[in-house]
Image: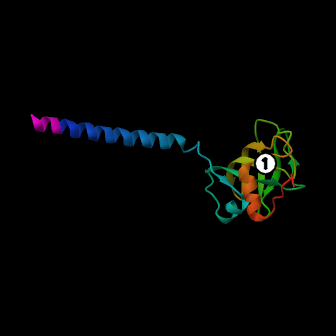
Amino acid sequence: MKSLKKRRRVQVLVATAVALFIATGTIGYALRDGINLYRSPSEVRASAPLPDEYFQLGGLVKDGSILNRDGVAFDFVITDGAAEIPVSYVGRDPRPDLFKEGQGTIAKGHYRDGRFEAESLLAKHDESYMPREVMDTLKESGVYQDPNS
């Protein structure tokens, strides 16, 4: 009788381990597109991501770089002071009102053929706000200046 109990215990432990492994794999697979990493233009230039990799590109919108196209499409350049990445935005939503040259922004999309294809844009929501990731990147390159000082 003891051997039957031991066998059941082992079977339950193995079944639990398999179920845990499958659940972890399923969660990881489901989140693979939901986890998008932030990169600066310098990081993208140093190590170009794969064309199908979805990520966030952040920095300042270069002065004089916004070029309007038909509809809600437009082009601009994101810079961190050390490198520049040309960006094409073709989205469903019009350009955010606070999206301006010289301001911090984060674009979400894909980097293909030396150009970032943005599907969505995040712009600051007031005069003093800048996304933390963009601020950290600009501080590292020595470009960031605190507007409050």
The residue positioned 68% from the left and 60% from the top of the image is 44
119 versus 41 height, above or below: above
Q: Taking 49 as reference, is 121 left or right?
A: right
Query: Residue 106 at what x, y percent from top left?
Result: 74, 48
Answer few, some or many: residues within 10 Å of disc 1's Cα (few below 14, many 20 plus, some between 14 and 19): some
Magenta segment:
1-6
Query: Residue 109 at what x, y percent from top left?
Result: 68, 47
Q: Quadrant of the N terminus?
A: top left
4 versus 108 height, above or below: above
Q: Which of the colour schemes (rainbow, by chain, secondary structure, one colour) is used?
A: rainbow
Q: Give the amino acid at mark 1.
A: Met
What is the number of callouts on the image? 1
Q: Main secondary structure of the magenta part?
A: helix
Q: Nearer the viewer, residue 35 or 132?
A: 132
Q: Nearer the viewer, residue 9 or 64?
A: 9
The residue positioned 76% from the left and 35% from the top of the image is 92
Q: Nearer the viewer, residue 127 or 104?
A: 127
Kindly give the residue lying farthest to the left in the view shown: 1
42 drawn magenta: no
Query: Residue 59 at what x, y percent from top left?
Result: 77, 54
The residue positioned 35% from the left and 38% from the top of the image is 19
88 versus 79 height, above or below: above
5 drawn magenta: yes
Query: Residue 146 at what x, y percent from top left?
Result: 83, 55
Q: Quadrant of the C terminus?
A: bottom right
Q: Secondary structure at mark 1?
A: loop
Q: Taking 46 as reference, is 75 left or right?
A: right
Label 1: which residue? 130
